[in-house]
């Protein structure tokens, strides 16, 4: 039993250390000091309907905590498209999630990401630290994302703020899908859909 504990603890610490390195290298590009907790990852994944056809686009997956929860939810690896800026996270994601499409790129530039991809989207899941960006950047990302999502398909955003990163607009509505206190720091899950 002690051997099993030794094998799991270093891996968890290595993941946290990798996350901290990402934070030091690019403070505005990492949403949290720690990866998403299993409770937060499950709350995000619960917003995705596995029976709806198409690809799940994950923006800023980091070390893959939410990716793992999406797989547990029943999303096949072949339906996952992960876009991550940090090359260390990209390498880690490719090792962990064989069968998923892992791309290195700027997840804020969703127009470039979506260019050349014609298939339907089931959902867009965002781990991007939107509150670190100007309001106009947030709104543009959301507007572009909702353009490619079919009506009713969610754009799911985690946030550590009390209010949604982008308030309800004329063309979309936002709903708080959960408050996760068992996360460091406590987090909220927001879903956006277009009318």
Image (tube, rainbow, N blue to C red):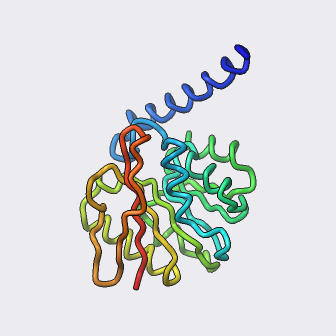
Q: How many labels, in total? A: 0
Q: Nearer the viewer, residue 97 or 4?
A: 4
Which quadrant holds the N terminus? top right
Residue 138 screen position, x and y as percent: 32, 65
Q: Is residue 13 above or below residue 70?
A: above
Q: Is residue 60 above or below residue 10?
A: below
Residue drawn at x 48%, y 72% as measured from the top left: 154
Q: Is residue 56 above or below residue 12?
A: below
Residue drawn at x 63%, y 46% as measured from the top left: 93
Residue 48 screen position, x and y as percent: 57, 66
Q: Nearer the viewer, residue 110 or 61?
A: 61
Residue drawn at x 61%, y 51% as measured from the top left: 69
Picture quadrant of residue 173: bottom left
Residue 128 screen position, x and y as percent: 41, 54
Picture quadrant of residue 101: bottom right
> Quick one: which residue is furthest to the top in this view?
2
Q: Is residue 189 above or below residue 11?
A: below
Which quadrant holds the C terminus? bottom left
Residue 45 screen position, x and y as percent: 56, 58
Residue drawn at x 67%, y 47% as measured from the top left: 94
């Amino acid at each position: 039993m002690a051997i099993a504990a030794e094998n799991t603890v270093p891996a968890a610490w290595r993941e946290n250390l990798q996350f901290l390195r990402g934070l030091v290298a690019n403070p505005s590009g990492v949403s949290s000091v720690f990866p998403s907790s299993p409770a937060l990852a499950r709350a995000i994944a619960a917003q995705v309907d596995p029976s709806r056809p198409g690809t799940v686009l994950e923006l800023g997956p980091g070390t893959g905590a939410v990716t793992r929860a999406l797989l547990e939810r029943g999303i096949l690896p072949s339906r996952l498209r992960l876009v991550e800026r940090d090359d260390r996270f990209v390498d880690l994601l490719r090792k962990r999630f064989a069968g998923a499409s892992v791309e290195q790129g700027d997840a804020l530039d969703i127009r470039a990401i979506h260019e050349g991809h014609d298939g339907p989207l089931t959902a867009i899941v965002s781990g991007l630290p939107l509150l670190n960006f100007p309001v106009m950047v947030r709104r543009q990302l959301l507007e572009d994302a909702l353009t490619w999502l079919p009506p009713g398909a969610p754009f799911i955003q985690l946030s550590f703020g009390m209010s949604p990163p982008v308030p309800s607009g004329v063309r979309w509505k936002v709903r708080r899908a959960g408050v996760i206190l068992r996360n460091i720091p406590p987090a909220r899950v927001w879903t956006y859909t277009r009318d």
